[in-house]
Image (cartoon, rainbow, N blue to C red):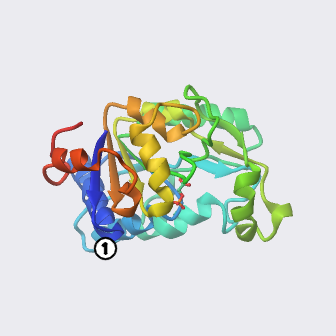
Amino acid sequence: MKVIIQPDTAMASRLAAEMVADQVIGKPTSVLGLATGSTPAELYRLLIEKHRRGLVDFNRITTFNPDEFIGIPHDHPASYHACMRKALFEQLELAERRCHIPDGVARDLMGMIEQYERAIERTGGIDLQILGIGGDGHLAANDPGSSLASRMRLVPITMAKRGYLAKAFGGHENIPRQAVTLGLVNFLETHRCLVLAFGESKADAVARMIEGPVTALVPASVLQQHPDVTVILDEPAASRLQLADYYREAWLGPYLGTRP
Ligand code: PGA
């Protein structure tokens, strides 16, 4: 993993935006894996700015999101369909057919899962997968306990998550019971991963992802087995890394440095 520590979230997001922009400029038909959550919000805002200023042409990209709630209509404000449309797709003026999100209201969920994985495969695979990491080490909806060999599947929405979802869904009784998510192996199959983590609340998970053992207790630790991962952190998120000095030394410039 290449670990890049930036002084703050704004600088970390700017570096991430440059990396995504370079990917799209270098390959205008890039396939991007997108994450939801608050972590990539500033990155997405910066990409929209690049689009508006005509610096990057996103017209021909294809996107895949990793997860969605089951049984929640696409226009529900808490659905990832609605969130992504609002936060990115509409503002980048992407054609709908280029933006893929798992269909959580599909009648045949197993068929949908099969087709989704096949659709990724048909593109030649995800060129750059953007990921956030949960405070417990989860990746997309792969919670602790997820098999390191997992593929796309239905997963339960556990008690731990129900607390913070209650508000978005207007009460506990409305929280969906399941989500669908790409699995950990799907992320290993991507060509390149860009993991972002900001803030002290992510510091423990970040240290375990990068330096801990590869374990189902920390699903993100599976990324140690991916040959091309860049992790961009702000200082608080990097605060529990034992080898922070080594990463600082190993990274020589805008993600051109040697790779630990
Ligand atoms: P966050 O979520 O970006 O909202 O912190 C990260 C995640 O759950 O993957």
* Residue 92 x %, y %: 40, 66
In the displayed structure, 159 sits above or below 113; it is below
Q: Is residue 71 toward the left or the right of residue 133 in the image?
A: right
For the residue marked with disc 1, what is the amino acid?
A: Arg
* Residue 218 x %, y %: 54, 39
> Which residue is tagged 1?
52
Q: Quadrant of residue 242?
A: top left
Tag 1: Cα neighbours inside 10 Å, few (<14), some, or many (≥20)? Answer: some
- In percent of the image, x 57 and y 49: which residue is there? 136
In the displayed structure, 146 sits above or below 47; it is above
Q: Is residue 175 toward the left or the right of residue 144 in the image?
A: right
In the displayed structure, 151 sits above or below 233; it is above
Question: Extreme left residue here?
Answer: 252
Q: Nearer the viewer, residue 168 or 204?
A: 204
- In percent of the image, x 78 and y 71: which residue is there? 170
Residue 172 in view of the camera: yes
Image quarter (top left, top right, bottom left or bottom right) of the C terminus: top left
